[in-house]
């Protein structure tokens, strides 16, 4: 097989696995095997960019940055839906329909997915553009971001219409949403409030690589052909063209789109109601949020006869589920201290059944929220289960407020260590400033230090950390490195073997590379990605600890908030002592020699665009060389580009653009000379 065929075959194979995994939820190979194949393809494409397919599976990782989203007029308007709330509403709707169309009316019942609506346009089997609903007439072009969502096919399967729009909803399933929040809490950020807003916010992120990291899904529900009388082969039933909504869902599935299989045909409003009843209770088992059901006249001919009002189709109706709400008594407000010292007030409720679970607690977020709700102990409150796992308190039932009720006084001192709390300007949360003396913070920080993505200390778990601190054996993470087997043996549930494992695990962590140690230190707002950036830029902890805010913000992607937090961290004498101790024990606090050997600052402040095929290095290697030497790689030419590194077979448009913007075009050799 020649290279081009190899690239094609690998792309096809990866596309199939993506489909199995993201559309069918039925992977047939392990993630590991998938990653290996993806790497192979990436390498082949880097060596032979001329053979890389425009919609290669490697493009899913994003990287395109959009500063301003282009406004696009919808070729076919995106309507809203009329709402109904009862059987009567639906019967009224049926009466109106029957006046306007002849014959039997069948309905397609679908779930109403709660996310952000999107319109995808496909031409000749390829994704042409993706546009948000906007005001219905025009929306934003968010194609670069949508391309990173793996359940959106870039290339269609089987038979497809020459050109069509397909509409759907971008949702963020609960599981992924909760994981994103865990990571945010981990670095001391406020968690996102609900999946819907997070999904729609994701569409407008400027960096598509950020979107790629979010576990978004696209669920499709409607096809609009550009030309009604252009038969395009055979539909689900072997007939030409599309006749019904139900068929078009099946066609969408066959083309490779994700279409939930809950959809059902109903012959009467009674059957519609059965569907509604079923999903009103079973929707809680779905992996994503739904807020109702959408009922559509199935026959597309009848749909056309019914047409649209100014705002919505006459042939469709949404039925909104009642938000599951109960009222219960607020018994107590308690306050939790997080690893970063952030205080979260928690409502302790009289246990009550809600959406199939017993609810005892709800988050109150912060002092402002308490004030806004005017919530008090003893109040009867309304609790609602939205997207989050933790339910929220919607309002207080003021009619039931006891006469002797007292306004809630937010705590002023830390519930753990009794230190006076602080709240900085612009921060919603109160913090306990007793960084090194507050037990919860101390334990939390060490637990973070040993966690999998940080020092990954085998043989040591969160509970043991708490034991070690409470027994007075350690007070910070540097103390771990002085622990002896004899010290830990007497601890609860410790045996000789497990004590040995623990000590060995700690010893082994001295090999963990600098960037992960930096993440492990638990500096507020310094997550994994930021830690990598800082490690690469400063190369060792001494340089980083001396950096000023002005200096820090010049690093790519480091903003004021992170910079301040880093400076604060190293301003503390105690932290500096702990870091020195880590260093004395041999923990990696600098990039290793072989990483460093290939890194300089020679290209600092310069931005490169790389295009074409190269002789002595691959394109990927070239990009790495730029970054390792302090330069930046960008995918498109702008007035900010310092150089265009041109290889063989570079696209003519890049050349023209570079010439008009006066961007110097250099050869591979010119570039390599810059590094000498
Ligand atoms: P609304 O925003 O309440 O006017 O409801 C209309 C929106 O519901 C549409 O813009 C879609 O984004 C969304 N929606 C979710 N699921 C469906 C579905 N199965 N069929 C049609 N629209 C849906
Ligand atoms: Zn405290």
Image (cartoon, rainbow, N blue to C red):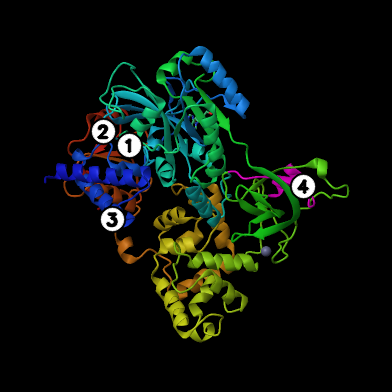
Please state which of residues 287 and 635 is positioned toward the viewer in this rendering.
287
| Left or right of 263, for residue 669 | left
Is residue 377 located in the magenta-colored stretch of the structure?
Answer: yes
C-alpha span from label 2 to label 4 = 58 Å
Which numbered disc, 2 or 4, marks the residue that appears first in the sequence? 2
Please identify the quarter of the rendering in which residue 397 is found: top right
| Left or right of 383, for residue 98 | left
C-alpha span from label 1 to label 2 = 9 Å
The label number, if any, that marks residue 380 in the structure image: 4
Which numbered disc, 4 or 3, marks the residue that appears first in the sequence? 3
- Outermost residue toward the left in this view: 1
Q: Position of residue 206 (x, y in %)?
A: 44, 37
Q: Looking at the image, can residue 174 be seen?
A: yes
Find numbered disc 2 in the image and state the secondary structure of the residue it sits on: loop
Foreground tag (2 vs 3): 2
The range drawn in magenta is 366-386
Q: Please report contact status of discs 1 and 2: CB closer than 8 Å, yes or no.
A: yes
The residue wearing badge 1 is 256
């Amino acid at each position: 097989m020649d290279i081009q065929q190899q690239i094609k075959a690998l792309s096809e194979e990866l596309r199939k696995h993506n489909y199995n995994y993201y559309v069918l939820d039925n992977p047939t190979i392990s993630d590991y095997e998938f990653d290996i194949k993806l790497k192979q393809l990436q390498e082949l494409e880097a060596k032979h960019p001329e053979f890389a397919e425009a919609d290669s599976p490697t493009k899913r990782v994003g990287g395109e940055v959009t500063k301003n989203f282009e406004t696009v007029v919808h070729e076919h308007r995106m309507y809203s839906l009329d709402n109904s709330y009862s059987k009567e509403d639906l019967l009224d709707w049926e009466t109106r329909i029957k006046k306007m169309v002849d014959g039997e009316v069948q309905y397609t019942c679908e779930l109403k997915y709660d996310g952000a609506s999107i319109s995808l346009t496909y031409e000749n089997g390829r994704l042409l553009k993706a546009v948000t609903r906007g005001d219905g007439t025009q929306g934003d072009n968010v194609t670069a971001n949508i391309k990173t969502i793996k359940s959106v096919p870039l290339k269609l399967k089987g038979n497809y219409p020459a050109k069509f729009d397909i509409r759907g909803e971008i949702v963020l399933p609960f599981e992924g949403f909760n994981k994103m929040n865990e990571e945010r809490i981990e670095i001391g950020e406020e968690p996102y409030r609900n999946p819907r807003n997070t999904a729609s916010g994701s569409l407008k992120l400027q960096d598509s690589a950020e979107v790629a990291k979010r576990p978004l899904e696209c669920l499709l529900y409607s096809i609009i052909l550009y030309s009604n009388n252009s038969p395009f082969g055979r539909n689900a039933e072997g007939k030409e063209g599309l006749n019904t909504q139900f068929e078009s869902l099946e066609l969408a599935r066959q083309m490779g789109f994700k279409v939930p299989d809950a959809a059902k045909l109903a012959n009467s409003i009674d059957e519609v109601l059965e569907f509604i009843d079923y999903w009103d209770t079973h929707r809680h088992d779905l992996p994503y949020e739904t807020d109702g059901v959408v009922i559509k006249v199935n026959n597309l001919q009848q749909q056309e006869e019914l047409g649209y009002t100014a705002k919505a189709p006459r042939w469709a109706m949404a039925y909104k589920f009642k938000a599951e709400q109960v009222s219960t008594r607020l018994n107590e407000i308690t306050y939790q201290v997080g690893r970063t010292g952030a205080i979260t007030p928690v409502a302790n409720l009289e246990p009550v059944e809600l959406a199939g679970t017993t609810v005892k607690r709800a988050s109150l977020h912060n002092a402002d929220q308490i004030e806004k709700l005017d919530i008090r102990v003893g109040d009867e409150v309304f609790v609602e289960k939205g997207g989050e796992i933790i339910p929220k308190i919607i309002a207080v039932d003021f009619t039931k407020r006891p006469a002797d009720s007292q306004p809630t006084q937010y705590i002023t001192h830390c519930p753990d260590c009794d230190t006076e709390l602080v709240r900085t300007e612009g921060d919603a949360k109160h913090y306990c400033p007793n960084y090194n003396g507050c037990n919860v913070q101390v334990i939390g920080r060490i637990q973070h230090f040993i966690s999998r993505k940080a020092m990954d200390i085998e043989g040591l778990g969160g509970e043991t950390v708490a034991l070690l601190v409470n027994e007075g054996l350690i007070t910070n993470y540097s103390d771990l490195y002085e622990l002896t087997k004899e010290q830990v043996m007497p601890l609860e549930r410790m045996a000789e073997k497990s004590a040995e494992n623990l000590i060995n695990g700690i010893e082994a962590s001295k090999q963990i590379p600098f960037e992960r140690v930096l993440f492990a230190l638990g500096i507020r707002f310094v997550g994994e990605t930021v830690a990598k950036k800082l490690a690469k830029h400063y190369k060792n902890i001494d340089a980083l600890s001396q950096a000023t805010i002005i200096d820090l913000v010049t690093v790519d992607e480091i903003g004021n908030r992170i910079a301040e937090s880093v400076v604060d961290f190293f301003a503390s004498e105690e932290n500096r002592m702990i870091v020195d101790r880590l260093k004395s024990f041999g923990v990696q606090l600098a990039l290793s020699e072989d990483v460093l050997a290939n890194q300089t600052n020679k290209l600092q402040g310069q931005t490169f665009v790389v295009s074409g095929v190269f002789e002595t290095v691959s394109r990927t290697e070239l990009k790495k060389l730029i970054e390792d030497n302090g330069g930046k790689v960008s995918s498109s030419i702008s007035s900010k580009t310092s150089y265009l590194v041109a290889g063989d077979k570079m696209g003519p448009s890049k050349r023209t653009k570079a010439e008009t913007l006066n961007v110097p075009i250099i050869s591979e050799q010119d570039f390599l000379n810059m590094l000498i």
